[in-house]
Amino acid sequence: MPNKYTQDDLILFIYDELTEKEKFNIQKALETSPELNKEYHSLLQVVGSLDSLSYEPNPSSVEIILEHSHHEEHFH
């Protein structure tokens, strides 16, 4: 039987964005489908990696914004 759940469904499951019935159905599918379970665990790793990332703006972008701000101050 082909898997009826998509990566989108699994992501919603991971972020707890489903109804109780949907969560129950996916949980049952995870218990019976090794392929779906493998995909779920792969997505859990990706989500974990995303949660640990930190971002900093490029220094040149910050400089451009500061220059623009400074320029605007002188004309108002």
Image: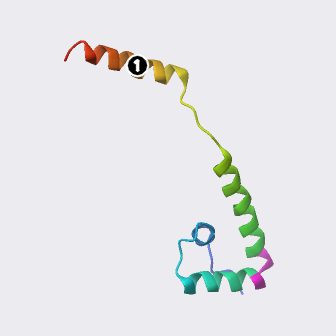
Relative to residue 4, is residue 44 depicted above or below?
above
Q: Give the quarter of the figure containing the N terminus.
A: bottom right
- The residue drawn where x is 54% and y is 76% is 18
Query: Which residue appears at 30% of the width and 14% of the height?
Result: 71
Assess disc 1: are there few (<14), some (14-19) or many (≥20) residues with their C-alpha within 10 Å of its C-alpha.
few
Residue placed under numbered mark 1 in the picture: 66
Tell me if I can see residue 58 in this picture. Answer: yes
Question: Which region of the structure is painted magenta?
Answer: 31-35
Q: Position of residue 72 (x, y in %)?
A: 27, 18
Camera-side residue of 4 and 32: 32
Amino acid type of the residue that numbered disc 1 sits on in the rendered structure? Leu
Secondary structure character of the magenta stretch overall: helix
Query: Which residue is at a point 63% across and 77% down the rendered structure image?
Result: 5
**Where is residue 9 shown, x and y percent of the image?**
59, 72
Q: In the figure, 24 relative to 74: above or below?
A: below
Question: Residue 2: in sight, yes or no?
Answer: no
